[in-house]
Image (cartoon, rainbow, N blue to C red):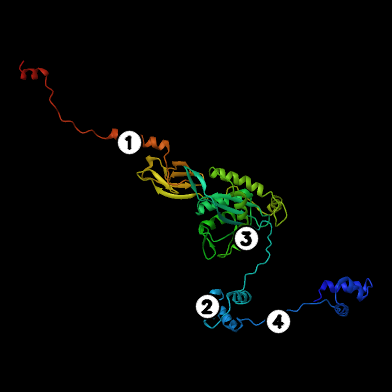
Amino acid sequence: MLEVEQWAEIRRMIRVEGLSQREVHRKTGIHRDTIRKALAEPKPPTYTRQAVRASKIDPFREVIERLLTENPTLSGVRILEEIRLLGYQGGKSILNDLLAEIRPRFAPAPRTFQRTTYQPGELLQFDLMELREEVPVGWGQTRRGYLLTGELPYSKKLCAALIFRKKFEDIAWGMNECLTQLGALPEKVVIDREAALHKGAGHPTDSFAAWLGQLNLGWIILAPGDAQAKGALERSHRFVHGNFEAGRSFANPLDFQDQLGKWLTKANNRSHRTTKQIITERFTEEAASMRPLPKHLPDIDHRQVMRVSPQPYLRFDSNDYSLDPRLVGRRVELRASQDKVLAVELDTGQVACQHTRVFAKGLTFTDPEHQEELDQMRIERRDQKPRAEQPEVEIRPLAAYDNLIPA
């Protein structure tokens, strides 16, 4: 069959160069009848699809379509078993070709997406990313860690903080850190259905609602299984795994956060592949549309009231921290942050303990002052204990014994 390129060349050679059909035949080798047809046909040659030959599976097509109507995800193996019972003698490859053609008609309609545009300062997306490697936390231990990540969809500026638990106090601390890194407030925050933030039916927990209210922030809680709604952060998580976490070692949580801060500075000074702009420059534009941070961010310390037991220790995050033993029996309030564990006696405001928080587990920490108090109290109890009365014993002169023993 004459190709389109040959058809065009024949017409050019005869009508532009003025060659004869014989000369065209000699130069191209194309038959003269084909040359005449090319000149006579004003439109380029087209190819018509050959009629499809009958297939062994054609008699069973109706049965296959009925099976797919009942169960669109029915496997090819099961369909083959069913039609074999009805006399199908062909192979599985023929069936697979047919299923590839017709199965989409029976499957649920695929989800469609529209291009999303963001206004400056409109949204801040938050998410939790589990680290692939555990973080050293001292005492020869490592612990599974998470990054609380935040990203502004308009400027693509990324912020993050290391936490070790999915409790509200830890997540809220991470969100406070992200806001501090940004230095400004958006109109709304976007989160998925994390248990510490979402109490059900798209409503925030009381603790999260209180945090939002103190900052006058709106919120959007995504539908379940709707990871596409924060696809920008999902891509950023892959970027963090591959460009920050991979190939690095960390001495402790402080070293991790320090390296993370330096990397974020570098990452936010790159040209983003979507916006084609330097992230920090685009953020400068966005920050002008955002509200300033309040002087004090919401207090998100873990608080708990307890009574000091005869063994004066409190347990927090699987570690035991000593308390002032002279406060046994009194009520104290525990206030735990990411860097310290503090307890205050409720009636007097006296500090019952102040320890550096440790993220290793199963340890006991005793303040030397508390140990001295315990030792002093033992001495006081010993001195105050009444001595048992001693029986009176007669003391005789030694001469009395000499008289009893003959010389």
Query: Separation of disc 1 and disc 4 at Cα?
Result: 103 Å
Q: Which mark is in front, 1 or 4?
A: 4
Crowdedness near tag 4: few (<14), some (14–19) or many (≥20) residues, C-alpha within 10 Å: few
Dots 3 and 4: beta carbons under 8 Å?
A: no
At x 52% / y 77%, what residue is drawn? 81
Front-most of residues 3 and 368: 3
Secondary structure category for the residue under label 2 = helix
**Residue bearing the label numbered 1:** 378
Query: Separation of disc 2 and disc 3 at Cα?
Result: 41 Å
Q: Position of residue 131 (x, y in %)?
A: 55, 52
Q: Which mark is in front, 3 or 4?
A: 4
Q: Which mark is in front, 2 or 3?
A: 2
In the rendered image, is residue 210 in sight?
yes
**Residue bearing the label numbered 2:** 81
Report the disc number at residue 51.
4
Image quarter (top left, top right, bottom left or bottom right) of the C terminus: top left
Crowdedness near tag 1: few (<14), some (14–19) or many (≥20) residues, C-alpha within 10 Å: few
Secondary structure category for the residue under label 1 = helix
